[in-house]
Image: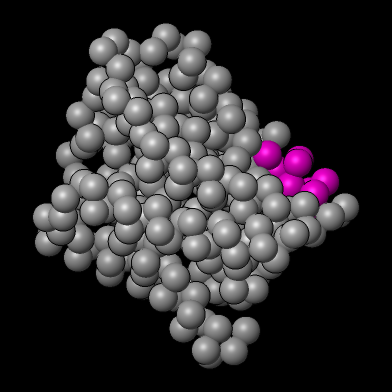
Amino acid sequence: MTPLDYAQMAMLAAVASFCQNLTGFAFALIFVGAAGALSLLPIQDAANIASVLSAVNGFIYLRSHPFEPRWELLRPLLASGVAGVGLGLVLLAWLSGNTLHGLRLVLGVSVVACAVLLLARSVPRATPSSPRVLWGVGLVSGVLGGLFSTAGPPIVYHLYRQPLPPSLIRQCLVALFLACALVRLAAVGIAGALPWHTLTSAAVALPVVTAVTWWQARHPPDWPPALVRWIVCTLLLAAGGSLLASAL
């Protein structure tokens, strides 16, 4: 990678971190989607870098915000999400070895679906969903987390429909993404599929992610939720649309 490539990657990490801290999700979706659309990095490398940076972002966020775990929500999400990560990594290995266009297509559909679900978010339910739904949603999210380190779409849509305060939703999302990122990194590292250049690239962007998260924790933007949603959706649609165009 050239110095310009590193600068672009750091800028993507800053934008993704900013959106993640606003909404509780979207870091990997924006980072991996944009890196793939710009052909800045191979999708596998971008997903590995996103896992490292997402884990760091999650640690800083949870340390900067009071966290009172709701284990009746987190237990099924974490257990099924971790299992799904393994399935997603197996699928990633198959797609990488058989079709690069298929990999871009799956990622593009995931990114666009997340944007559409966020824009069309339904009115919150009057009562919480059953635990069985949490297990299913956690599993699907884990598969996407294993594939691209982008566990967001299913769990974001599900949790934002629950009768829960936004702050709790953001914390649950960050906790799930942090767990999936750590499990993914451990599995990829044990398999010997985490090259040094990936860690070097993550190290370059790490100070940017740390600085953005630290600054937002002390100076949280007072933006209307609708504006935040539209900004994130616009970024996701641009990245996902570019990936689909290149794949098709």
Q: How is the image coloured?
A: one colour
Verify whether residue 149 appears in magenta: no
Position above or below: 110 against 196: above
Magenta region: 88-96
- On screen, residue 85 versus residue 9, left or right, reads right
Outermost residue on the right side: it is: 98
Residue 152 in sight from this viewpoint: no
Viewer-side residue, 192 vs 132? 132
Q: Residue at x 40, y 59 (%)?
A: 234
Position above or below: 208 against 131: below
Residue 224 in sight from this viewpoint: yes
Percent coordinates x, y for residue 116 in the rendering: 46, 43
Outermost residue on the bottom side: it is: 3
- On screen, residue 102 versus residue 33, left or right, reads right
Percent coordinates x, y for residue 179 in the rendering: 47, 39
What kind of secondary structure does the magenta stretch mostly adopt?
helix
Position above or below: 236 against 68: below
Viewer-side residue, 186 vs 43? 43
Percent coordinates x, y for residue 29 in the rendering: 50, 53
Q: Residue at x 76, y 40 (%)?
A: 90
Give the position of the N terminus as an image quadrant: bottom right
Q: Residue at x 65, y 58 (%)?
A: 244
Percent coordinates x, y for residue 31 in the rendering: 49, 62
Viewer-side residue, 105 vs 148? 105
Q: Which quarter of the picture shows residue 17?
A: bottom left
